[in-house]
Amino acid sequence: MKENNNLQLILTEDKSYSIYNEVVGESYHSHKGAYTESMLVFIKNGLLPIMNVFQNLKVFEMGFGTGLNALLTQNTAPSKTIFYETVEAFPLEKRFIDLLSYTDLPDLRSSLHVFESLHLCDWNKEAAITPYFTLLKHHCDFLDFEFNSNDFHLIYYDAFSLEAQQELWTEDVFVKLYQILVEGGVLVTYSSKGQVKRALRSAGFRVERLAGPPGKRHVLRATKD
């Protein structure tokens, strides 16, 4: 894989690491806390409310990034059968993966093998990370990606911001995601921009504005009723 010299490791305010992309001009997580943001936006707002609603879970993540959301999902529900599918256009090099040190965090100290497996498993092939957690990573651009199923229960939408990647926050994109969810399925994202809310509603979602993590007033949860 070609080295990316436009990335920098950064330490966020809750002592968890993230990556800053100099070309995009944004980090993968909030500077106020990568772990804190992911736990609130994706786990508390997304995974926890629905994990007991459905027997087995299918999760799609837009933007695998550092693997933190996948790691937190498995760590939060280690005995829940989860199929986790994700798309990433620019996989991280191993030198960054080794420096992230997520498993030094108190809640993740027993998850080193899982974290390594999430990153070391092959792209574009299903991998059994644990007996309960199966991962399928696609190395491609999301706009070129075609889903093979429409029975997902949960979507983590974690693209760069509207300002950086406007093409990923359109009504057409959210219609595509609406169609892959089962009834009662949920999409969660850190963005609460008015344009994003309108695009989600136009796609058919019922949109809720929820309290955000430190440094951010609101985030969104969208449900397919």
Image (cartoon, helix red, strand yellow):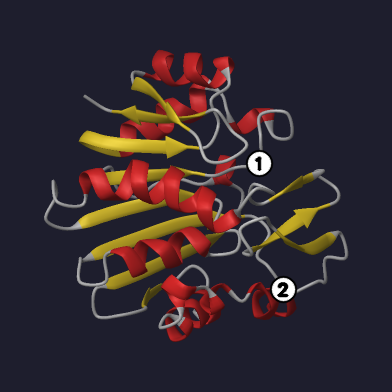
Q: Secondary structure at mark 1?
A: loop
In-image side of 142 versus 151 (left or right): right
Classify 10 Å Cα crowding around label 1: few (below 14), some (14-19), many (20 and above).
Answer: many
Residue displayed at 38% across by 44% down: 155
Q: Position of residue 56 (x, y in %)?
A: 17, 58
Q: Is residue 213 above or below residue 111?
A: above
Q: Is residue 14 left or right of residue 7?
A: left
- Identify which residue, 40 or 88, lies in the foreground: 40
Residue 68 x/y as whole percent: 52, 63
Residue that label 1 marks = 160
Residue drawn at x 53%, y 48% is 37
Kindly indicate the quadrant of the structure image that contains residue 57.
Answer: bottom left
How many callouts does the rendering have? Answer: 2
Residue 11: assigned label = none
Near mark 2 (Cα within 10 A), the count class, few <14, some 14-19 or many ≥20, is: some
- Above-or-below relation of 175 to 113: above
The residue carrying mark 2 is 96
Quarter in which the C terminus is drawn: top left
Earlier residue among tags 2 and 1: 2
Residue at position x 69%, y 34% from top? 165
User: Quick check: 86 left or right of 161?
Assistant: left
Q: Amino acid at mark 2?
A: Phe
